[in-house]
Image (cartoon, rainbow, N blue to C red):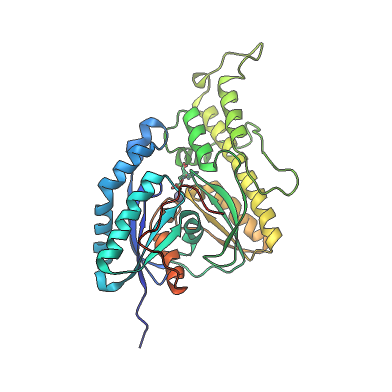
Amino acid sequence: MTDKKINILAVESSCDETACAIVADGRQVLSSSVATQIDIHERFGGVVPELASRAHIEAVNTVIAQAISEANVGPDDISAVAVTHEPGLIGSLLVGLMAAKTVAWVWGKPLIAINHIYAHAYAAALNDKPVEYPAVALICSGGHTALYHCESPTEMELMGSTIDDAAGEAFDKVASILGLGFPGGPAIDKLAQTADPKAVRFPRSLLKGQSLDFSFSGLKTAVLYHVNGVPGAKDQVPRGLESFSPQQIADIAASFQAAVIDVLRIKLKRAAAQIGAKTLILGGGVSANSGLRTAAAELAEELGCHMRMPELRFCMDNAAMIGGLGYHYFKAGKFAGLDLEALATVRR
Ligand code: KG4
Ligand code: ZN
């Protein structure tokens, strides 16, 4: 007789994606439904929290219904409900949390609290084999850039993080400077493939010593000054985006991306050496970047480590990673009460 599968229904709403998924035994994704809000926030060049909360309210019932119907499951097939409760935009988190609590209460299922960042580090295991630990996870998204020492899917220790902008935020802001639209990561990634990454030598920050922290705001300013000139500097040639050809703009995008990847690769290597990592893990929206994926794979080969990165659809915010990680809390019997709170920042 085979054991009954543990199916977790998961809800994610921490930023600007409303998502629901059903995941079996922590890895098999039965359904993954995502409603993105890109068209709502595009004209503002970034996520507007109040608009995000309202859009989550409009989408949440539909994505839950879609995920249930796509997986072809009913209440009896679901073992527990997992939900992102930290970190994120508080108004956004509250919508998913209320929806998940309602499903858990009405169906009489246990509730599982999930940390969004830990879930990004788990995404690489979806529809694939388990990760070999110890591992170093590099999580790069619009809101976070951090390195974690992982001993299991649920045991994560922060090794370093950004002291200012997140990598994805830098991609988005630089894309805005270069007139490439929002979100900027995919646009820069595409342009960079046809351009010269050595055209402009942008700064690489915080490389001294053994620091595992990141800083991307200086790099963003360097791109701004390169395009518009340094404010107050004498004898400057008048500049502005119009003074650059499309190829020059692509070269700036490629040079910026090369600077980000260089720093990420160097710190990932340092972190892996510090803990004797068997595996390198990428996660978060920026892990969809083709240049970063190639650089990380080359690094893993150089270090003799396993390399794990999520399928492209699981790099960006999704609920499958919440349901996958939720399984491990289920197995450990770690459940939350219906009084579970939403937390904007991560508890250390
Ligand atoms: O993980 P995510 O969906 O949301 C947050 O938790 O923040 O990440 C979104 C971020 C955005 O900043 C977006 O520009 C970036 O991921 N991104 C990329 C790529 N695709 C998305 N950055 C670089 N290259 C990409 N291909
Ligand atoms: Zn995320």
At x 37%, y 34%, the residue is 42
Across and down, in percent, residue 122 comes to 49, 61
Q: How many marks?
A: 0
Q: Is residue 217 above or below residue 145?
A: above
Q: Residue furthest front?
A: 339
| Front-lying residue, 65 or 198 | 65
Across and down, in percent, residue 325 comes to 45, 64
Q: Is residue 19 visible?
A: no
Q: Is 106 left, or right, of 200 in this rendering?
A: left
Quadrant where the C terminus lies? bottom right
Q: Residue furthest top?
A: 235
At x 34%, y 60%, the residue is 21
| Front-lying residue, 264 or 319 | 319
| Front-lying residue, 315 or 274 | 274
Q: Residue furthest right?
A: 209
**Residue 6 is drawn in which quadrant?**
bottom left
Q: Residue furthest bottom?
A: 1
At x 34%, y 53%, the residue is 96
Q: Is residue 322 visible?
A: yes
Q: Is 56 left, or right, of 158 in this rendering?
A: left
Across and down, in percent, residue 206 comes to 69, 41
Across and down, in percent, residue 8 comes to 36, 67
Quadrant where the N terminus lies? bottom left
Q: Is 181 left, or right, of 309 in this rendering?
A: left
At x 44%, y 73%, the residue is 333
Q: Is residue 181 above or below residue 109?
A: above
